[in-house]
Image (tube, rainbow, N blue to C red):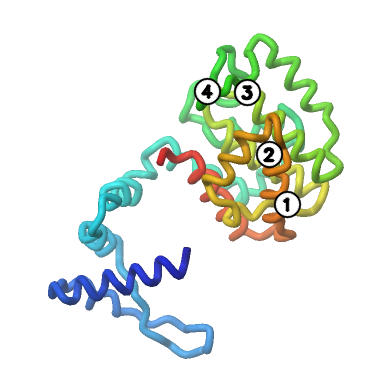
Amino acid sequence: DYTKANNYWRWLKRKLKSENNQLVSTTHGFKFVAADGKKRLSDTLDSAGVVELAKNFPNTNAMKFLDWFLYSDNSIDGQSKKKAYTLFEGNILDSIEVGTAKGLQQIHAYLFGGLYDFVGKIRQKNISKGGFQFANAQFLGNALKEIEEMPENTFDEIIDKYIEMNIAHPFMEGNGRSTRIWLDLMLKKRLQKCVDWSKIGKQEYMHAMMLSPSYNQTLKELINNALTTKINDREMFMKGIDYSYYYEEND
């Protein structure tokens, strides 16, 4: 969170300064207009400076950060995330069917096109995660038809439908990232709302999803408390994509 990050940065600056590290002095090279209208010095680094700073992180997360900062765009998730951003920029979302299996396939095909050879295709194999067995591939076609026919007029109905689609897990990979966009499109169309995913922590979301097949109230409360009317807000959409992909990262 912002406060913790700010405190950590202040501590790190003091540490680097005590070591006579020149990196700290280079961060004061820019002035930005603050909320009070005055130009104030800001801590700013170029990409080379960020890499140098990361090398001075006094913990084991430095290499993880550098790997993300330098190479994430070349990973499947990095490339897929860039595709996800353009969903908003190109108004592509308006062409996607809402609340249908076809709509979910459209989202999946767009996010992972050129990255997987099974994009938008319903899986033919059984899959599981964390000991949970998703819908049997043999009956997946019928399951998706039943999910499509589920109502989506109220918040409870929409979340029930989302839970069932998660249980179906129709693709070999990329289900969560695709289905969260699918959920937001239903909420936007039916309730003129969407989820501010930044208000939902990764662990609490994962826990609620794990419980949802047998107890859905935790997930409903979590999502209901994070709803916003900023359905056409670019920053809200981009932030949602960032959090959605973050949920899928391995700890």
N-terminal of the two: label 2 or label 3? 3
What kind of element bears circle 4? loop
Residues at marks 2 and 3, CA–CA distance in whole angstroms = 13 Å
The quarter of the picture where the C terminus appears is top left
Residue 182 is tagged as 2
Structural crowding at the residue carrying mark 4, measured as other residues with C-alpha within 10 Å and reported as few (<14), some (14–19) or many (≥20): few
Measured as percent of width and height from the top left, residue 165 is found at 69, 29
User: In this rendering, is residue 248 above or below 232?
Assistant: above
Q: Are marks 2 and 4 in contact (CB under 8 Å)?
A: no
Residues at marks 1 and 3, CA–CA distance in whole angstroms = 25 Å
- Counting the numbered discs, the total is 4
What kind of element bears circle 3? loop
Residue 170 is tagged as 3
Residue 131 is tagged as 4
Structural crowding at the residue carrying mark 2, measured as other residues with C-alpha within 10 Å and reported as few (<14), some (14–19) or many (≥20): many
**Horizontal relation, residue 77 to residue 152: left or right:** left
Residue 224 is tagged as 1
